[in-house]
Image (cartoon, rainbow, N blue to C red):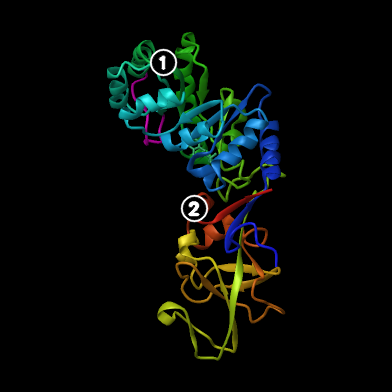
Amino acid sequence: MNKPLFNLRSWVEIDLNKLINNYSIYRSHLPDNAQIMAVVKANAYGHGDIMVARALQNLGVSLFAVSNIDEAVGLREAGISGEILILGYTPVSLISQLRKYDITQTIISNEYALEFLKSKTDVKCQLAINTGMNRIGLSMKDINECESLIRHYTQHLNVNGVFTHLSSADCLDTQSILFTNKQISLFEQLVQRLSDLNLSYIHCMNSAGGIAFPNKAFGIVRTGIALFGLNPSLSFKLYQGIKPILRWKSIVSDITLIEPGEAVGYGRSYIATKKTRVATITTGYADGYSRLLSNRGFVFINGYKAPIIGKICMDQMMVDTTDIPIVKVNDEVELIGDYYSAEDMAQSIGTISYEVLCNISKRVVRIYK
Ligand SMILES: *Cc1c(COP(=O)(O)O)cnc(C)c1O
């Protein structure tokens, strides 16, 4: 047998052509002069930030957003040359690193701005504005005060942009739409007052906002989930043709025949009611496969559905393959793909696809095609 090219146990296949296609479709619906800021935080939602950012850079994307300085430095060292914006907190003691790698830092609060001022740094920064999410940002409760603070900071810091974040752009009920419009209009008022500052980067949209309000994007949309082909929420509608770019696969390592009354797995949480053909799969919760899917989730083997039986173990899980015509050791298993999507999996355990993808752990090999 040929030596496998990678550890054939638990792996994801990522289709960069689909990424490019998703990007093109999303981009085609935005105004001509608008740019996409690719949000590649958390290892590009588990897809591999370097490979994703490189593919997008080849298409001309020059704006990237990450969550922290380690992610930013990793991209820079991998040859990502455009703007890299850290959306969250960086200890001010790391300012020299920000400067060395030409990374743009978000000013997340007034307290944080004061620390930056004290350091007399010329590191590029953007001001987060709190328009209602109440996570980070300068308060807009008093727009005059907000404006004067921004003017003060732009005089003394190297500020090249302002942005806000929409909390409910993916919700399309009347109340949410009203709230999103309120956030956008607050931000618009502020941006209008600051027009003489000629800030280069003004943005407020995530994937959902860019679809629901494409003409309010101020020329930049921070796009994350849509690039990876998933819906911001189940009630939302993505553009036709946008498709998931990731499949998660594993292998059948063993097959065990059991009799009615026999149990499967830790704590004997599953008791067979019939003669059952149990297949063991080489993926477990240490791979990021949620243990909440015990006795609840599904995998697909040769296109047939196999329910998970028993508790998911750290590195393995068991499924019922009694109704599948043929199953052999070394058969490929699809954990996430056409038959059972990240969204289906998320719904089974009461979370969102974002979390399912981000949880796929480091030891799961990423394969690109
Ligand atoms: C994560 C994030 C985004 C991207 O959101 P998606 O829903 O994945 O498009 C945009 N802006 C900020 C501030 C974020 O934290």
Element marked by disc 2: loop
Q: Nearer the viewer, residue 114 or 219?
A: 114
Q: Quadrant of residue 278?
A: bottom right
Place of residue 93 in the rendered image (x, y in percent of width and height, measured from the top left): 30, 29
Q: Quadrant of residue 57?
A: top right
Residue 287 seen anywhere in this rendered image of the structure: yes
Ligand 1 contact, mark 1 (Cβ < 8 Å)? no
What number is the disc on residue 158?
1
The part of the chain drawn in magenta is 131-143
Residue 365 to residue 83: above or below: below
Residue with the mark numbered 2: 362
Residue 139 seen anywhere in this rendered image of the structure: no
Place of residue 157 in the rendered image (x, y in percent of width and height, measured from the top left): 37, 15
Say what amino acid the circle numbered 1 marks. Asn
Q: Nearer the viewer, residue 315 or 341?
A: 315
| 271 horizontally vs 138: left or right | right
Of the numbered discs 1 and 2, the one sitting upstream in the chain is 1
Q: Quadrant of the N terminus?
A: bottom right
